[in-house]
Amino acid sequence: MEPLPIPTQAIMKKGVMGRRGSELEPSRFGRLMLLLMGLVSLTVVFIFLSIAYRTPIFSSSISSKIKPLTHIDDSFEGSDKNLERDRNCCKGIQHLELWGTALKWGADFKVNSSEECCRACSILCPPKIGICRCNSWVFCGDKEKCGTKYGECWLKKQKDVLAPEKLESGSSKMWTSGLIFGSGEGIVAMETEHGTFRIKLFPECSPHSVAYILEVLAQGSCAGCHFFRAENRGKSWDINGDHIRDASFGPPFALIQGLFEYTGPASNSIPEHCPSISRGSVAWVGSSSGSEFLISLANHGEWSKPYTVFGSVLPEDMVIAERIAQLATKPEVWSNITVRVLQNFVPFKIHRI
């Protein structure tokens, strides 16, 4: 489409060629009209050009807008540190190919590692920003199997992050894939008779564990899932989970412990992400990944044994965990340590919010 003509030029040319010299001087009203028409025309042209040349959000040039991986923006801070995405984590699952709408085609975007591919997606899903443009990625890192596709990094958008589209999986597959959960995404509910608390999942740090939770979620049932141990903060930790000076480190040990017991496959038992346990942390107990888990009521920097942390309870929902910790219990001795076991187990369901 050609640019719109400027009326003032056409009118002035017509006036010069069609009138006598005595009629060339227009009236004040005519000058005002010409000025107004000119301004209107320029506005129309500006709007037209702005629309015509505006760059779409997901253009083929998206790679040019990705910052160098050594200059990732660290200015975003979460309202609660325990819910922030760990910048040191960017992991995926080998032998898995996720489907989804491609934002960046791997044929045009190659990187050196799965972590680099993950971080490229993460940049497009910054914390504390409502819009997460990239929530999944796929990388080809097996030189022998990938061939010319080696190094390809596909940045994708899942329609449903809690039910990602899987194209294929298995040990013979050459792809590695991962998920990125933005602010307000990847949150599941754990419902009990004493209330429901929400858990933010961490797929970037513990992808296998989160995949397991999503499998449980997809089942639509968690028959047999329950809490069986409950120990409050006692006089050792304050309401914020901080240890009280000169107090013991338990018992009680400020936690509730439960069991995922459903008919699906067990989770990968290899430890994934083992930071210090803090208030709200949801972690597997020891090497029993995929079955027993705990929710911590306190900051347990004193625990030296690694625990895979795969999520965190939202701070405002910790009151439900505290409520369960106050239920009636009975003592039992496990490996020479006295623990508190619930007199009546507390069943739970896991579902979407």
Image (spheres, helix red, strand yellow):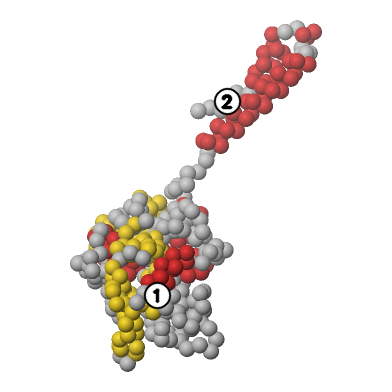
Q: CA distance from mark 2 to mark 1?
A: 75 Å
Residue 256: % across, % down: 37, 75
SS at badge 2: loop
Depth order, front residue of 15/352: 352
Q: Amino acid at mark 2?
A: Leu
Residue density around tag 1, few if under 14, some if 14–19, many if 20 or more, within 10 Å: some
Residue 137: % across, % down: 37, 59
Q: Residue furthest front?
A: 328
Q: Which residue is mark 1?
A: 326
Q: Amino acid at mark 1?
A: Gln
Q: Residue at x 47, y 88 (%)?
A: 248
Q: Residue furthest bottom?
A: 336
Which mark is drawn over residue 4? Answer: 2
Looking at the image, residue 251 lies above or below residue 149: below
Q: Quadrant of the C terminus?
A: bottom left
Depth order, front residue of 193/76: 193
Q: Residue at x 33, y 79 (%)?
A: 329
Is 193 left or right of 127, judged from the image as shown?
A: left
Residue 295: % across, % down: 39, 73
